[in-house]
Image (tube, rainbow, N blue to C red):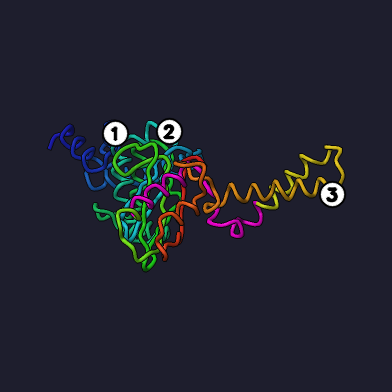
Amino acid sequence: MSDIEKIKQLRQSSGAGFKDCNLALKESNGDLDKAVEILRIKGVSKASKKMSREAKEGVIAISGDKSKISAIEVNCETDFVAKNEDFINFVKELSELNLSSDGDLAKLKKTNMSNKQTVENNLINIIAKIGEKITIGRTEVLNSNGTKNYSYSHTVVKDNLCKLAVLVSIKSSNDSDELNQFGKKLAMHIAASNPLSLEADSIDKKIITKEEELIAEELKNSGKSKDIIKKISIGKINKFKEENSLLTQSWVMDPQKKVRDIIKDLNISDLKIKNFYRIKIGE
């Protein structure tokens, strides 16, 4: 086999560039197996150096159906790489594995991909090949008994890959078209309105405390009495809770109504929003 043919074969098997393959073959005295090892070692080294950089771009992939659904975030440094075919194919396969791994990131990284290498090893290889820091970010799987799961993708990059994704889980024995339409619209509402929780009481206490501090700072030089300031503060914090709790938000498709009003209008007695998850690249 000629040197050029060896380089072609090595490029095909490793995905590395012409120059790297040529140098690896020279270092291995033409031994293809050793050249693969050399590229692997150099790839790890290159990947390690790249991991110190920031990765704020990327995509979110959704996989699954109404019975079980998942979302996974994969970050990279530039939007250009987020549209790269190798990156897209890696994320698509990763998304399916995330679904079967139930969103367990540690388990996912040890899972073999279609090329018989682990996710962890494939991640190192694609970093070395593409030349950017790539990280697996947040993951979520919704899979509760008796629930139906819906999703919404915003700013779609390709197929099931997007920049903002919503998963929502609804519990009901009903399986009407009306419920399914509501599930899809609810996912769209969550994408637009970004609720912090289902109800006011379940908003993170740290968020409420921070908001109270901001309100106090805003009002401290208002010149109003302590009693008036207290009343204004209570009003502002209650409004904050209402605007950031899913059930009390104004329905984006009919702002005159709250989400809870839309649910009431559906007249499905056992309908309950079980869970929701919203994820956006860069947030």
SS type, badge 3:
helix
- Which kind of residue does numbered mark 1 sit on? Gly
Q: Is residue 38 visible?
A: no
* Circle 3 residue: 227
Residue at x 64% of width, y 51% of height: 207
The magenta stretch is 180-207
Crowdedness near tag 3: few (<14), some (14–19) or many (≥20) residues, C-alpha within 10 Å: few
Whether tag 2 and tag 3 are in contact, CB under 8 A, the answer is no
Among numbered discs 1 and 2, the one appearing first in the sequence: 1
Q: Is residue 135 visible?
A: yes
| Quarter of the image that includes the N terminus | top left
State how many labels appear.
3
Q: Observer-nearest residue: 138 or 278?
A: 278
- The rendered magenta stretch, by its main secondary structure, is classed as helix
Q: Observer-nearest residue: 256 or 135?
A: 256
SS type, badge 1:
loop
Q: Is residue 265 magenta?
A: no
Whether tag 1 and tag 2 are in contact, CB under 8 A, the answer is no
Crowdedness near tag 1: few (<14), some (14–19) or many (≥20) residues, C-alpha within 10 Å: some
Among numbered discs 2 and 3, the one appearing first in the sequence: 2
* Circle 1 residue: 17
* Circle 2 residue: 78
Nearer the camera: disc 2 or disc 3: 3
Residue 124 position, x and y percent, is 37, 47
- Which kind of residue does numbered mark 2 sit on? Thr
Nearer the camera: disc 1 or disc 2: 2
SS type, badge 2:
loop
Relative to 232, is 59 on the left or the right?
left
> What is the distance, in whole Å, between disc 1 and disc 3 at their CAs?
71 Å
Q: Is residue 276 above or below residue 28?
A: below
